[in-house]
Amino acid sequence: SVTQATSKATGVTLNNVAGAITLNNAALAAAAEVTFTVTNSKVSSGDVVLVNHGSAGTAGAYIVSANSIAAGSFKITVSNVSGGSLSEAIVINFVALKGASS
């Protein structure tokens, strides 16, 4: 597991095929989203990365998605779908499923 240092946009490094990322508790406005990079030497461009709001914070207030999957990194976008600003250090779980290689 790893914890963001300074903001919800701060990148993290976690070199495992699965893990937990604790976000910084900086405010995320209603209807706002933020994207950060996960540097991960175990991830390849053909992999499928699944993420979810694992624990902490308001259940149902966030949508999380993985995107921009590349060799050595991927990005996670967190959207606040609640009606107000939230300052919660939510925990995001992820797993990288190894894709086909050619």
Image (tube, rainbow, N blue to C red):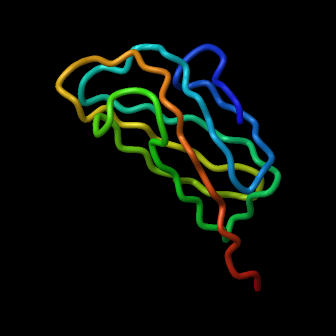
Q: Is residue 42 above or below residue 90?
A: below
Q: Position of residue 28 (x, y in %)?
A: 37, 21
Using the image as rendered, state which of residue 9 and residue 54 is in the foreground: 54
Q: Is residue 85 above or below residue 55?
A: above
Residue furthest bottom in the image: 102
Using the image as rendered, state which of residue 70 and residue 89 is in the foreground: 89
Q: Position of residue 12 (x, y in %)?
A: 69, 32
Q: Split into 4 quadrants, where in the image is the N terminus?
A: top right
At 25% across and 35% down in the image, what residue appears?
Answer: 81
Q: Is residue 101 above or below residue 30?
A: below
Q: How many marks?
A: 0
At 49% across and 42% down in the image, what residue appears?
Answer: 54
Q: Position of residue 22 (x, y in %)?
A: 59, 29
Q: Position of residue 49 (x, y in %)?
A: 59, 59
At 63% across and 57% down in the image, what residue appears?
Answer: 95
Residue furthest left in the image: 83
Q: Split into 4 quadrants, where in the image is the C terminus?
A: bottom right
Q: Quadrant of residue 57?
A: top left
Using the image as rendered, state which of residue 92 and residue 35 is in the foreground: 92
Q: Quadrant of residue 5?
A: top right
Direction from residue 5 to residue 41 in the image, left or right: right
